[in-house]
């Protein structure tokens, strides 16, 4: 332990100068960043979060990480772990006080161990998803979480990333075998939570508490992840459901027919497509732009079976023809997988280019999706006339990015109250009526804290606080 220990109540003022001096002595030069521009860049979130960092440390080894956090702790400087900074709830950037230190994990890539017999990999938290999968590819393996950003392993665990192939592979938690955590209190050694085994009932599943906890419980330094075999073929279609009322019957029919072959069912609304197309005219239109259905589904089947064992393309064609016969599908286009995914991944950018976006990352039980969309659109029409709902998302797992686009300048300050009431109406509908979630994928963080406090039952909040306190008895994480 370096230097003095702050009082247990965390009231000692941060001594940034002393922390910097001790860090300079303890770390190699490139592990400490004080350059204002670099710190300012790291203090700006992908979408939300715009603060000021006291400084940034970028440890390349776990030993440097432990040493840096202990020094910060000794000088009462709160630390904020940051992975790839792609999080969407303002939780990877410091507040405006200028007293918090960013601990960037981007250089922590010392461990990469594939265990082929176990179909798993042990990696440092700083690895990006793209690099992880690039290294796994020669082994015919993949970490099957798929999304439109390139996050770090630690950030993915901290936010329990879902993504587009959740319907087949689940979220990060479902693929997390073990992890190492530097607890918030900075006192203990690294905690090893579970091991590479898939079956382990030898105690509480603490690793699962860490997944999705943000950085509340500590800094994840390493993880062992379940891998899947790279599919050797896939087939994709973009389909127009016959009616919104039978949309979820169609999803059920796809699941029943294809089981584990079904790797994605993503919804794309006509306005979301129109914004993407006008922002990126080179995007291939699955349907004629004017004939884009109110809501289209991108359906993907994948298999590690070779084409000699299974013709996935014809399997999809036959199934969709059958569903057309049954009146579940009105229209469909087969097989331009990359083009279809390019459309899917352009939707967020398209909406942001079209106006000011009020985003809702919600989930409801699947049977309530259509009713939710109908009622929420009604709230938008009433509260924000002229705004356009350009929603899309992982509809196969009941998730929806219900984006409301105001195609004009950022709404004036006086309209912020209207937006606030719209948020409240929509979240009330999601949580109180449909028993869904106001944060399906992105977590809590400053952006959602208000809703966490509104909608979580008091005893549940107390339990969460107590558990957090067990990990953080003395030391404030940002
Ligand atoms: C274009 C785009 C598309 C996206 N699509 C999806 C999607 O489909 N599904 C989805 O779930 N998310 C999605 N996201 C959100 C985001 O990519 C995920 O939340 C991602 O997992 C964050 O990882 P990160 O490394 O960028 O973490 P950061 O943004 O750096 O951090 C996020 C949180 O994790 C904490 N953290 C980071 N590293 C560690 C660590 N080692 N130990 C402890 N805490 C840590 C941070 O303090 C912060 O609280 C998307 C984001 C963008 C920009």
Image: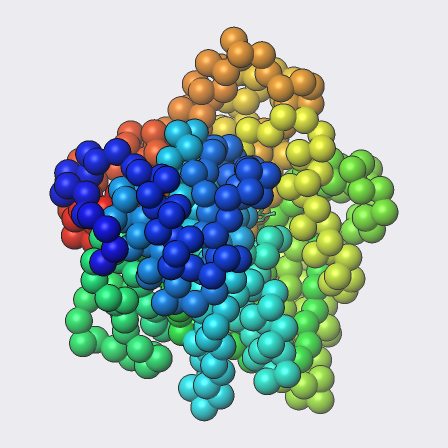
Name which quarter of the figure residue 406 lies in.
top right
* Quadrant for the C terminus in the image: top left
Q: Residue at x 52, y 9 (%)?
A: 414
Res. 171 image quadrant: bottom left
Q: Is residue 229 above or below residue 162?
A: below
Of the pair 421 and 88, the residue shown nearer to us: 88
Residue 114's spot in the image, x, y percent?
Answer: 49, 83
Classify residue 90 as left or right of residue 475. right
Residue 261 seen in the current view: no
Q: Which colour scheme is used?
A: rainbow
Work out which quarter of the rendered image holds the N terminus and state it.
bottom left
Measured as percent of width and height from the top left, residue 434 is found at 37, 38
Q: In this view, does 119 lie to the left or right of 202?
A: right
Whether residue 438 is situated above or below residue 241 in the rendered picture: above
| In the foreground, 80 or 373 | 80
Q: How many labels does the image show?
A: 0
Q: Which residue is drawn at 42% across and 86% down?
A: 118
Is there any visible trace of residue 351 in the rendered image? yes
The answer to whether 352 is drawn above or below residue 364 in the figure is above
Give the residue drawn at x 55%, y 42%: 35
The quadrant where residue 191 appears: bottom left
Where is residue 179 drawn, in percent x and y?
34, 68
Q: In the image, is residue 2 above or below residue 292?
A: below
472 relative to 23 in the view: left or right: left
Q: Where is residue 315 in the image (x, y as percent from the top left)?
A: 68, 74
Which is nearer the eye, 417 or 195? 195
């Amino acid at each position: 332990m370096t230097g003095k220990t702050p009082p247990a109540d965390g009231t000692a003022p941060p001594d940034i100068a002393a922390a910097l001096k001790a860090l300079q002595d303890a770390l190699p030069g490139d592990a400490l960043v004080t350059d204002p521009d670099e710190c300012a860049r790291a203090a700006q979130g992908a979408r939300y979060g715009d603060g000021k960092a006291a400084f940034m440390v970028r440890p390349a080894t776990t030993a440097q990480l432990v040493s840096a956090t202990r020094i910060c702790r000794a000088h009462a400087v709160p630390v904020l772990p940051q992975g790839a900074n792609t999080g969407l709830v303002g939780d990877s950037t410091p507040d405006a006080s200028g007293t918090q230190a960013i601990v960037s994990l981007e250089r922590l890539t010392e461990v990469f161990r594939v265990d082929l017999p176990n179909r798993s990999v042990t990696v440092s938290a700083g690895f990006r998803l793209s690099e992880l999968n690039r290294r796994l590819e020669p082994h015919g393996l993949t970490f099957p979480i798929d999304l439109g950003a390139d996050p770090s392993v630690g950030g993915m665990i901290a936010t329990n990333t879902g993504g587009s192939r959740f319907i087949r592979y689940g979220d990060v938690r479902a693929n997390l075998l073990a992890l190492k955590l530097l607890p918030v209190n900075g006192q203990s050694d690294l905690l090893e939570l579970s091991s590479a085994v898939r079956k382990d009932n030898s105690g509480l599943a603490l690793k699962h508490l860490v997944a999705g906890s943000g950085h509340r419980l500590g800094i994840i330094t390493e993880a062992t992840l379940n891998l899947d075999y790279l599919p050797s073929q896939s087939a994709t279609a973009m389909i127009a459901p016959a009616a919104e009322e039978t949309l979820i019957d169609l999803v059920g029919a796809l699941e029943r027919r294809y089981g584990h072959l079904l790797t994605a069912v993503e919804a794309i609304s006509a306005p979301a497509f129109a914004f993407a197309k006008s922002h990126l005219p080179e995007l291939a239109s699955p349907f004629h732009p004017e004939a884009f259905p109110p809501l289209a589904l991108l359906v993907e089947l994948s298999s590690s079976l070779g084409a000699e064992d299974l013709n996935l393309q014809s399997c999809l064609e036959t199934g969709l023809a059958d569903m057309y016969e049954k009146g579940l599908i009105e229209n469909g286009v087969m097989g331009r997988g990359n083009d279809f995914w390019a459309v899917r991944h352009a939707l967020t950018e398209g909406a942001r280019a079209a106006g000011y976006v009020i985003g809702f990352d919600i989930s409801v039980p699947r049977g309530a999706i259509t009713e939710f969309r109908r009622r929420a659109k009604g709230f938008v029409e009433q509260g924000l006339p002229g705004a356009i709902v350009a929603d899309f998302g992982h509809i196969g797992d009941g998730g929806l990015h219900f984006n409301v686009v105001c195609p004009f300048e950022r709404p004036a300050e006086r309209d912020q109250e209207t937006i606030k009431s719209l948020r409240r109406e929509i979240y009330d509908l999601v949580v109180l009526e449909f028993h869904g979630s106001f944060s399906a994928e992105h977590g809590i963080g400053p952006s959602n804290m208000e809703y966490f406090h509104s909608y979580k039952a008091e005893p549940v909040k107390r339990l969460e606080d107590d558990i957090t306190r067990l990990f953080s008895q003395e030391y404030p994480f940002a």
